[in-house]
Image: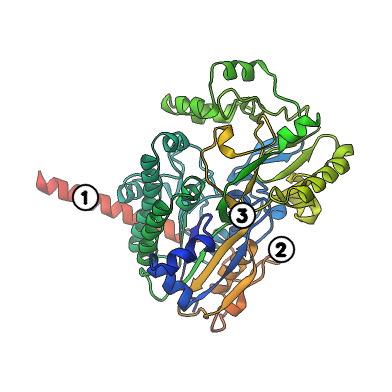
Amino acid sequence: MHQKMIMIGLDGCDFQILKPMIANGNLPFFQEILRGGSHGILKSTQPINTVPSWASIFTGVNPGKHGLIDFVFREKGEFIVASGRHRMVDTIWELLSKYNIRQIVVNDPISYPPSKINGIFLTGFLTPPGSTNFIYPAEIRDEVDKACGGYRTDLPFGFEETIAHDRSKGFELINDLARIDFETAKHLARNHEWDLLSLTFTSTDRLQHFYLDDEERMKNHYQMLDGMMREICELDSEANVMIMSDHGFAPLQKCFYVNSWLRERKYVKDQRSFLNRFLSKTNMTGSKIMSLLLRLRLYSILDKIVPDRIKRQVPSVSGESRTDYKNSSALLASADNGLYFNDLSILGSIRTELEVLMANNQNILQEIHLRDEVYWGEYSRRAPEITLLPAYGCEISPRLAQSWLEAPSKVADIRTGTHRPEGIFMAFGPNIRKTDLGATLRTWDIAPTVLHNFGVPAPEYMDGKVIDYLFETEIQPLESTGVVSGSYRSQLTERIRKLKKQQLSKESGRS
């Protein structure tokens, strides 16, 4: 018989943040986990961002196989904004469904539209603003909204401006996002059958980007999460529990504006389109335009029909010019990633200059790699030719600034924290050993380990290895049904029909 499991994702959580709070007695549940279970460092992907990292956690492969290289990647010569449709392998949710494992998945940050699994699925981060297509099966949308006061896949659009003008209000928004995810997961777990309950908190990432230097607010949010996690884990004391993050966090000290550095060397050209000049003169930015379109309920329509090359002409901050993707010889398309080349003949010289820069400025770049040194698999072609790993406390930014190395606040950026590669992994439960796992774990090790908990063999294509020394006893393998069971949805539809009938009967009786 397989063991039930609870998975909790804490986006951006870092032992550098957790352990001091635990030592001060602020996080009693986290303290119990560390003392009674296993823990170790979970090394992130390259780049150290939400999309590729969570995709590797949920699929068991490196980004070159799942294809979600970054928020933006190049496919057949065109730069594309990533969505769940660009994920090219199954997630653990889909694999477990073939074995009739009943699941509740709340706030998956890399899957949109929602996956049709054996259970209930709610999307997260990649969901387009304003979309109502965030849940499977759709019949329980009203139930979920009622339970949590209105489900959200992310913070309200324009929350950065809210934080800039009212830090207290911004902090309330972040707390509320965590509360919504918690109330949703708690309600669904209490009212629907499950073998696997998965909940990902993205509030921690937002918190640490903007409040990492605010010790009191950091402590308050983590104390709230400490209590929420205890409640979730007490829903079934016999379940094994795994807690993980996609990357860690460090204080943001400076930004390396790579495209500005390339522009000095005549490799990057500015976007000089009429649209960019017009928007710059009128101080219109992407966030202002999106806010207006959301109010007019036009965003979802225009987002589908406006080409990405047009979207890239819109300034992200007031008066900003944008990089000309087509006519630049080399460019950075996304934060903390690497360089795409339109002219491969200059790759060697640029790499040499970056290596000299790394040697002379050790607080800017930590590593420089060619694509095939970091990625492998069919979809490695989507990755940049050179990848850059920033040094601790530094962020690699695609924005065009006046100089190529500046404090982030000089380019209209109010963040105080940035990503680092070292995330967390913790596990405890009836079949979990107490051990220090060290720093040997990779993001793609999680999926095969979750499958192993249920007796499901990991597909041969997976890069990850089962953390088999995590478990106390041997787990017997299951046999696959080969198809996703439709029985759960049928039962759920019938249950909803009966509840509506009962409600109408009560209302009739009152009248």
Closer to the camera: disc 1 or disc 3? 3
Q: Is residue 2 visible?
A: yes
Q: Position of residue 330 (x, y in %)?
A: 79, 35
Label 3: how many Cα within 10 Å (few below 14, some 14–19, many 20+): many
> Can you identify the residue that label 2 sits on?
461
Q: Which mark is residue 454?
A: none
Query: Quarter-wise, where is residue 477 in the image?
Result: bottom right
Three-letter residue code for mark 2: Tyr
Q: Earlier in the sequence, mark 3 or mark 2?
A: 3
The image quarter in which residue 188 lies: bottom left
- N-terminal of the pair, mark 2 or mark 1, is 2
Q: Secondary structure at mark 1?
A: helix
**Residue 290 rendering spot, x and y as whole percentages:** 50, 28
Report the residue at 39% width, 53% height from top: 216
| Mark 2–mark 1 distance (CA, rounded to whole Å) | 49 Å
In the rendered picture of this protein, how many numbered marks are placed on residues? 3
Residue beneath the point at 41% across and 44% down: 152
Viewer-proximal residue, 99 or 461?
461
Q: CA distance from mark 1 to mark 3?
A: 51 Å
Q: Quadrant of residue 33?
A: bottom left
Q: Earlier in the sequence, mark 1 or mark 3?
A: 3
Vertical relation: 336 (above or below) 293 = below
Amino acid type indicated by mark 3: Arg
Residue 406: x and y, percent?
Answer: 64, 38
In the image, is 198 to the left or to the right of 380? left
Is residue 329 rendered to the left or right of residue 30? Answer: right
Q: Which residue is mark 3?
A: 420
Task: Please tell me which residue is depicted at 36% across the width and 61% down the height of the picture.
Answer: 228
Numbered mark located on residue 503 in the image? 1
- Can residue 477 be seen in this snapshot? no
C-alpha distance separating marks 3 and 2: 28 Å
Which callout, 2 or 1, points to the residue nearer the camera? 2
